[in-house]
Image (tube, rainbow, N blue to C red):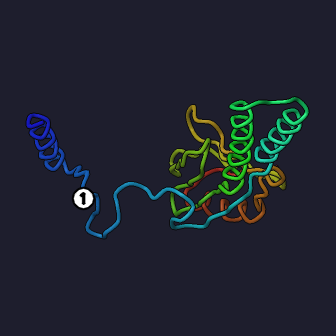
């Protein structure tokens, strides 16, 4: 155990010299150096609601319960059967409660994709396309497009288009209306 402690101490000294202290990440202003993720940071936040996947998971759980009640199940199978149905419903509730969002900051865009928070700098945005039913943010390079639908996720695309228009004007990004 002693040699492990010495290795940790040596690595801490190296990181402190580089200015990457993992224990104290605050700068002089008191904020961390990394971007603040999530829908609770600075900037304008537009929230939607996921209903398709939770609805599909709930439907699968109901169908599974109906099929299971038609056929007899015994002992351990009965317990596992109800646990599976309960977990499907729990997953549906968790996905329903986690709202998709777009946060527009001064020079960054934030969203959640595949249950991970992502951000996109203004310098990495190629163009923004919007119409009544959806908004598409096209990044430079091989990254996938960010698409926000009015009917699928209940985003207010008109308000988003106005704010993204200001963002595009400030950061010199082309914006297309369809």
Q: Position of residue 29 (x, y in %)?
A: 30, 70
Would residue 30 appear left or right of 39 to someone viewing this image? Answer: left
Find residue 72 and report its horizontal and vertical position in percent.
85, 30
Establish if 90 lies above or below 31. Answer: above
Q: Which residue is mark 1?
A: 24
Q: Residue at x 76, y 58 (%)?
A: 155
- 70 or 162: nearer the viewer: 70
Residue furthest to the bottom: 29
- Residue 135 left/right relative to 30: right
On screen, 133 above or below 113?
A: below
Residue in front for this viewpoint, 172 or 22: 22
Quadrant in the picture for residue 162: bottom right
Say if residue 63 shows up in the picture: yes
Identify the residue at horizontal 84%, vertical 33% (top origin): 68
Counting every numbered tag in the picture gives 1
**Dot 1, how many residues are within 10 Å of its Cα: few (below 14), some (14-19), or many (20+)?**
few
Q: Is residue 177 visible?
A: no
Q: Quadrant of residue 49?
A: bottom right
Q: Residue furthest right?
A: 70
Q: Residue at x 61, y 44 (%)?
A: 113
Which residue appears at 80% of the width and 40% of the height? 61
Farthest residue to the front: give it.
75
Q: Is 161 displayed left or right of 103 in the figure?
A: right
Q: Position of residue 35 (x, y in %)?
A: 43, 56
- Please tell me whether mark 1 sits on a helix, a strand or a loop: loop
Query: Residue 62 at x, y = what percent?
Result: 85, 42
Above or below, 157 against 138 in this view is: below
Q: Which quadrant of the figure contains the N terminus? A: top left
Q: Viewer-proximal residue, 56 or 162?
A: 56
């Amino acid at each position: 155990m002693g040699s492990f402690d010495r290795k940790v101490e040596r690595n801490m000294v190296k990181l402190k010299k580089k200015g990457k202290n993992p224990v104290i990440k605050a700068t002089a202003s008191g904020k961390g150096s990394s971007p603040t993720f999530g829908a609770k940071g600075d900037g304008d936040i537009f929230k939607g609601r996921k209903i398709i996947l939770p609805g599909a998971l709930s439907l699968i759980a109901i169908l599974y319960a109906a099929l299971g009640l038609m056929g007899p199940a015994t002992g351990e199978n009965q317990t596992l059967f109800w646990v599976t149905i309960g977990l499907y419903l729990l997953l549906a509730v968790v996905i329903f409660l986690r709202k998709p969002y777009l946060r527009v900051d001064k020079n960054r865009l934030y969203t959640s994709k595949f249950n991970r928070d992502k951000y996109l700098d203004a310098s990495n945005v190629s163009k923004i396309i919007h119409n009544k039913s959806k908004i598409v943010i096209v990044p430079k390079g091989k990254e996938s497009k960010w698409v926000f639908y009015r009917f699928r996720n209940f985003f207010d695309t008109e308000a988003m288009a106005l704010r993204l228009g200001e963002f595009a004007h400030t950061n010199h990004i082309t914006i297309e209306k369809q």
